[in-house]
Image (spheres, helix red, strand yellow):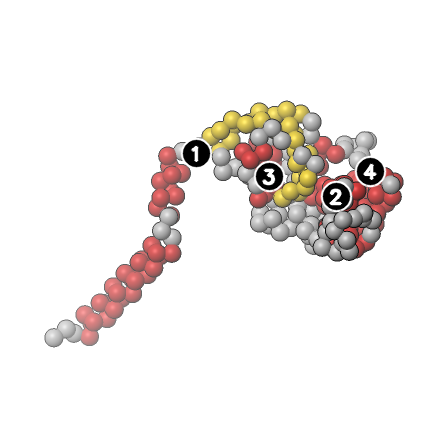
Amino acid sequence: MQSPGDLELNRRDLVAGASVAAAATAFPGSARAQSTDAEGAVLTKMSLTVNGERRELELDTRTTLLDAVREHLHLTGAKKGCDHGQCGACTMIVDGRRINSCLTLAVMHQNDAVMTIEGLGKPGDLHPMQAAFIKHDGYQCGFCTPGQICSGVAVIAEIRSGIPSHVSADLNGPYEVTDAEIRERMSGNICRCGAYSNIVEAITEVAGRQA
């Protein structure tokens, strides 16, 4: 007959073994992923036109557009916020349409035209949207501001192009630059400082100048 001590040891072994088995079931690809990384990244050559300049890159195929621009081209205006496409801090304009650059791979944009906040304007020659954000105090802490400004530029273009939003009454347009349209279209850009009303004012002013 086994002693109580032997039974206790067996219980511990059983629990430990079950934990290892559960971990292996939950993460079946972990060992394979490690071996793949050890074998080296898959690199590819590609071209992008960033802020009007042709750029040649050699990237790991898993590199996001955000990381390609920030880490390889050293344009750090676009920010990595949530890294899940929920905050809008990484917003860039690609071929005229705004995207969350953290959710798209760089290799998917071969030969595309990418516009970041650095390409919109510079000190002494600001884009009207940048100037309006300063005037209406839309910057706040500034972390989310590059994405907000890029989205603001794109929002006006979307409305002028007749692209409807969730609050548009008629899918066939035309659309006006109203507070409701701006707020709905900018809802993917989160500002934790609460500068929303100031941002709406800035976008409205720029839209009025372009009317």
Residue type at numbered disc 3: Leu
SS at mark 4 in the image: helix
How far apart are the alpha carbons under marks 4 and 3?
Answer: 24 Å
How far apart are the alpha carbons under marks 2 and 3?
Answer: 23 Å
Residue at the left extreme, as displayed: 1
Q: Earlier in the sequence, mark 2 or mark 3?
A: 3
Quadrant of image for the C terminus: top right
* CB contact under 8 Å: marks 1 and 4: no
Residue type at numbered disc 2: Glu
Which residue is identified by label 4?
A: 128
Mark closer to the observer (4, 2): 2
Q: Earlier in the sequence, mark 4 or mark 3?
A: 3
Which residue is identified by label 2?
A: 158
Where does residue 150 sit, x and y in percent of width and height?
Answer: 72, 41
Please tell me how crowded label 4 is: few (under 14), some (14-19), or many (20+) other residues with Cα within 10 Å.
many
Which residue is identified by label 3?
A: 66
Where does residue 143 sit, x and y in percent of width and height?
Answer: 69, 46
How far apart are the alpha carbons under marks 1 and 4?
Answer: 42 Å
Which residue is identified by label 1?
A: 41
